Image (cartoon, rainbow, N blue to C red):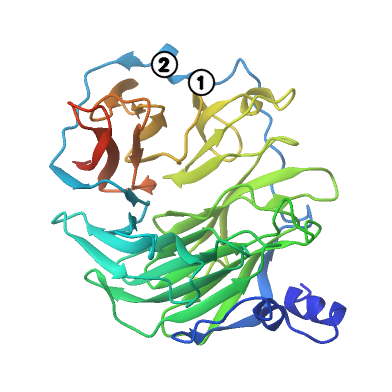
C-alpha cells in the first residue's frame, strides 16, 4: 500500500503530513513527539479480501422484545458512588475509567481524570491542557490501566492534538508523548486504549477541504518512538474504535469500487491489528452507528431507517454472526454507545434504561436509570465483554429539580 504520508508530501512540495499539520498548530513544549512509520497493515479499498455484504430478510430475524420472556432484573449494584456534577465517564476495559471533569473555573474548562471501579476514588490526571494556548481545552479522554490518552482542541481554530503517557494507579507515570496534530480539516481523533496501546483514527472533516482523502487508524505502544498506520479506509470510518477483549472493532469503508459499504471488522490487538479476525459487511449505503464484538457475535446498531438493506437497514440494534445468521434484534432507537455484557448477556442502551437480553435462557429484563430521567438518562462506561458493568447518570436534586450530582453504579456479571 502506498504510504499516505509520502503521497501527501509529494503533493505539497516535500512537506510531510506531520510537519505540514504542525505549521498550523502550536506544538506542546512539554511533550516529546512520536514518529509514524511508513506502510499500512490492512487496506480496505479493494473487494478481493473482504467479506460479501450481508443480506438479512426482514422476516428471518428474532425480535428480543416479541420473543423473549420478560423477567425481573437478575443483577443488583455492588457499588454506588456519588460524584460532583460535571463528571462524564467514558468506556474502558480496566479498573480505571477515563473521566472528563468540569473545571472549577473557566480556565481550565475541562480536567482529565480517572475513576477507580474498585474503590470509587476519582483522581485528577491532567490538570490543564499541555498545548499551552489560552483557547485550548481537553476535548476527550481514553485509558487502560497502563496508558492514558487525551485530545486537546483549540476552540478558536479547531486545531487539535493527541497526547498519551504511561499510566498507573490513577496517575501519569511517563513522559507525555505527542501522537498527532492536525488542523480543522481533520476531525478530532476518536481514541481507545488497551493494555499499553493507544489506537486512534484520523479522518477528514465532513465539512472541510480534505473530504476526498482516505482515513487511517493508527497504533502506538508505550515505550515506542513510532506509531504505525494499521488500517486504511477510503473515506471516513463509520464508528469509533471499540475495544472488545482481545480485539478492536473498526468500521472502515470497503468494496469502494462497488458502492458505499462499511465493513464492521474485528482485528487482533495482540499482533498490532495485523490479523483480521472477523468481518460483517453491511448492506449497501447502510451506515452502522455503533459496533462491538462479544464472543462470536457482532453487536451493531443502526440509527436510521434505510429504503433498502433488508432487516439491517432498519433502525435498531442487531446481534448476529458475520454471515448474517441467527440475528437477534431490538427494534428501538439506539443511543450513544455499543452494547456490553458477558457470556450471552447483553446490556443495550435504550433512552432512560437498558434492555438486558439473556440469549441463554431467552429472557430480557430492564435496568432503569437512577431517577428514571429521560432528560439526563443513564449511560454505560463499559463496552463489549466485561466482568463488571458500569453505568452513570446525572441526577436531579429532589427539591429544586435541577441536576445536582452524578451517580455511578457497578454490576458484577
**In this view, 39 is above or below 351:** below
The residue shown at (33%, 50%) is: 89
Q: Is residue 39 visible?
A: yes
Q: From the top left corner, tell me how far across and down residue 70 is, in percent.
A: 30, 14
Q: Can you say whether 284 is above or below 66 in the image? A: below
Separation (CA) of disc 1 from disc 2? 8 Å
Q: Nearer the viewer, residue 336 or 251?
A: 336
Tag 1 secondary structure = loop
Which residue is more in the foreground, 9 or 61?
A: 9
Residue placed most toward the observer, 279 or 160: 160
Point out which mark residue 378 bears: none
Residue 189 spot, x, y in % from top left: 56, 62
Apparent side of residue 352 relative to residue 24 in the rendered image (left or right)? left
Which of the two discs, 1 and 2, labels the residue nearer the N terminus?
Answer: 2
Residue at 63 percent of width and 65 percent of height: 157
Badge 2 element:
helix
Residue 57: image location, x then y, percent: 66, 21
Give the label on residue 65, or none: 2
Tell me the quadrant of the picture where the C terminus can be found: top left
Can you tell which mark lies on residue 331?
A: 1
**Could you say where residue 263 lies in the image, as x and y percent from the top left?**
65, 47
Name the side, left or right, on which 103 lies relative to 182. Answer: left
| Cβ atoms under marks 1 and 2 closer than 8 Å | yes
Q: Hey, which quadrant is residue 286 in on the image?
A: top right
Other residues around mark 1 within 10 Å, as few (<14) / some (14–19) / many (≥20): some
The residue drawn where x is 78% and y is 52% is 47
Amino acid at each position: 500500500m502506498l504510504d499516505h504520508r509520502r503521497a501527501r508530501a509529494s503533493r505539497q512540495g516535500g512537506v510531510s503530513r506531520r510537519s505540514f499539520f504542525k505549521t498550523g498548530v502550536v506544538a506542546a513544549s512539554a511533550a516529546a513527539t512520536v514518529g509514524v512509520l511508513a506502510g499500512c497493515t490492512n487496506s480496505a479499498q479493494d473487494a478481493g479480501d473482504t467479506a460479501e455484504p450481508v443480506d438479512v430478510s426482514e422476516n428471518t430475524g428474532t425480535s428480543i422484545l416479541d420473543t423473549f420472556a420478560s423477567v425481573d432484573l437478575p443483577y443488583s449494584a455492588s457499588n454506588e458512588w456519588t460524584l460532583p456534577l460535571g463528571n462524564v465517564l467514558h468506556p474502558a476495559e480496566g479498573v480505571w475509567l477515563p473521566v472528563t471533569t468540569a473545571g472549577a473555573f473557566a480556565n481550565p474548562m475541562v480536567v482529565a481524570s480517572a475513576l477507580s471501579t474498585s474503590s470509587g476514588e476519582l483522581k485528577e490526571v491532567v490538570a490543564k491542557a499541555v498545548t499551552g494556548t489560552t483557547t485550548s481545552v481537553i476535548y476527550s479522554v481514553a485509558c487502560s490501566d497502563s496508558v492514558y490518552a487525551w485530545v486537546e482542541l483549540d476552540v478558536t481554530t479547531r486545531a487539535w492534538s493527541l497526547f498519551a503517557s504511561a499510566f498507573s494507579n490513577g496517575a501519569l507515570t511517563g513522559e507525555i508523548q505527542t501522537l498527532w496534530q492536525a488542523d480543522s480539516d481533520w476531525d478530532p481523533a476518536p481514541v481507545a486504549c488497551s493494555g499499553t496501546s493507544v489506537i486512534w483514527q484520523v479522518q477528514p472533516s465532513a465539512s472541510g477541504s480534505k473530504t476526498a482523502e482516505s482515513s487511517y487508524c493508527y497504533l502506538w505502544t508505550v515505550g515506542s518512538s513510532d506509531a504505525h498506520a494499521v488500517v486504511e479506509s477510503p473515506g471516513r470510518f463509520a464508528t469509533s474504535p471499540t475495544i472488545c477483549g482481545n480485539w478492536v472493532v473498526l468500521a472502515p469503508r470497503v468494496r469502494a469500487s462497488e458502492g458505499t459499504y462499511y465493513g464492521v471488522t474485528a482485528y487482533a490487538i495482540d499482533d498490532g491489528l495485523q490479523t483480521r479476525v472477523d468481518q460483517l459487511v453491511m448492506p449497501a449505503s447502510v451506515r452502522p452507528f455503533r459496533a462491538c464484538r462479544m464472543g462470536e457475535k457482532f453487536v451493531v446498531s443502526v440509527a436510521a431507517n434505510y429504503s433498502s438493506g433488508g432487516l439491517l437497514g432498519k433502525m435498531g440494534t442487531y446481534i448476529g454472526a458475520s454471515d448474517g445468521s441467527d440475528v437477534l434484534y431490538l427494534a428501538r432507537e439506539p443511543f450513544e454507545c455499543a452494547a456490553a455484557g458477558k457470556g450471552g448477556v447483553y446490556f443495550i442502551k435504550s433512552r432512560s434504561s437498558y434492555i438486558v437480553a439473556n440469549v441463554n435462557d431467552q429472557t430480557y429484563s430492564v435496568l432503569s436509570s437512577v431517577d428514571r430521567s429521560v432528560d439526563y438518562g443513564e449511560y454505560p462506561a463499559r463496552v463489549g465483554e466485561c466482568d463488571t458493568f458500569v453505568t452513570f447518570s446525572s441526577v436531579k436534586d429532589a427539591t429544586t429539580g435541577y441536576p445536582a450530582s452524578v451517580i455511578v453504579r457497578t454490576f458484577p456479571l
